[in-house]
Image (cartoon, helix red, strand yellow):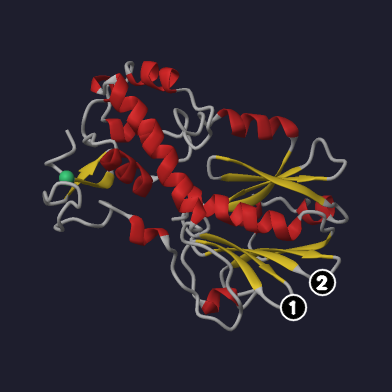
Amino acid sequence: MPELPEVETVRMQLRRKVIGKIIESVEVFHAKSVNHDVAIEDVLRGKTIADIDRVGKLMIFSFVDEKDTFLLAHMKMTGQFFYVDENDVTGGGHSFTNADMDLPMKHTRAGFHFTDHTSLYFNDMRLFGYVKLANAKEVEVAKSRFGPEPIHPEFDVDWFYSKLKKRKTPIKAALLDQSFIAGLGNIYVDEALWRAKVRPTRRADKVTKKEAAALAAASGDVMNESIKVGGTTFQHFKDTNGSKGNFTQYLKVFGKQGTKCERCGGTIKKIRCAGRGTHFCPRCQK
Ligand SMILES: [Zn+2]
């Protein structure tokens, strides 16, 4: 599943490619992926992409001189975005191979063709993702569902701590709750908890102020570091092999069960917490 760093990486790549492009046509390969909205082609034809914004893992395309028309895009479990021009394919999302970049392919759900003969394709094997039209009000509602992101420098640690004090769930569940703080997926929560030396099962209201500050910093750091190396996504040329991302080599606990904790030598354990596979070091995470 594409996590926030992958979404952010895709967003930044696509921004470089599609801002200023004029949509000539929209090809819908599967109606569910566009929310069964048959108007999408007529609405978007002739519009110029102004920007791609993001809140949580939701991407928001805006258009020049359009205050009430947006395109909301979410990759969910298996979504991928690929921008195609005559030289190369750029994009990513869910892990992919060369076959996914021979576009359109069998899991391509929508294609946006620009007047300069380049295209943006949305692939989504399992059909949980979408690219759908939204008006300004719907965009506001969508944005209101997300809490602040620890990735932002202005993230307020005092606020974070005061909210944790009111939660009796495991800290892991609190960190995964996108309406509380946005952006942390399963991998990054485990990594942030390891860095802050907090056990995932600890009740959120038992986290100290110092630990809350460490957690906020660690959460921002793991996401920023992952974005820096491109999450699991980066530019691929048609002739090269699709390769997996680079952040996996920096992981300290996720997927490391049975191996030694590099900080204390304890053995990394995998349990189930907040309904998710959860990795931690029982020796140094209290
Ligand atoms: Zn340890």
Q: Residue 55 appears in which quarter of the rendering?
A: top right
Mark 2 or 1, closer to the camera: 1
Residue ID at (78%, 41%): 69
Question: Secondary structure beneath disc 2?
Answer: loop
Callout 2–callout 1 Cβ contact below 8 Å: yes
Q: Which image quarter has ligand 1?
A: top left
Residue 83 picture location, percent across and down: 67, 66
Residue 132 picture location, percent across and down: 67, 48
Decide: is 64 above or below 138: below
| Amino acid type, label 1 | Glu
- Please tell me the numbered disc located at residue 47: none
| Amino acid type, label 2 | His
Q: Which residue is mark 1?
A: 86
Q: CA distance from mark 2 to mark 1?
A: 8 Å
Decide: is 112 above or below 264: below
Residue 219 falls left or right of residue 89: left
Q: Residues within 10 Å of mark 1 (few under 14, many from 20)?
A: few
Residue ID at (47%, 55%): 2
Residue 123 picture location, percent across and down: 58, 64
> Would residue 184 be seen by someone viewing this image from the given angle?
no
Q: Is mark 1 within 8 Å of ligand 1?
A: no
Q: Which residue is mark 2?
A: 117
Residue 99 falls left or right of residue 283: right
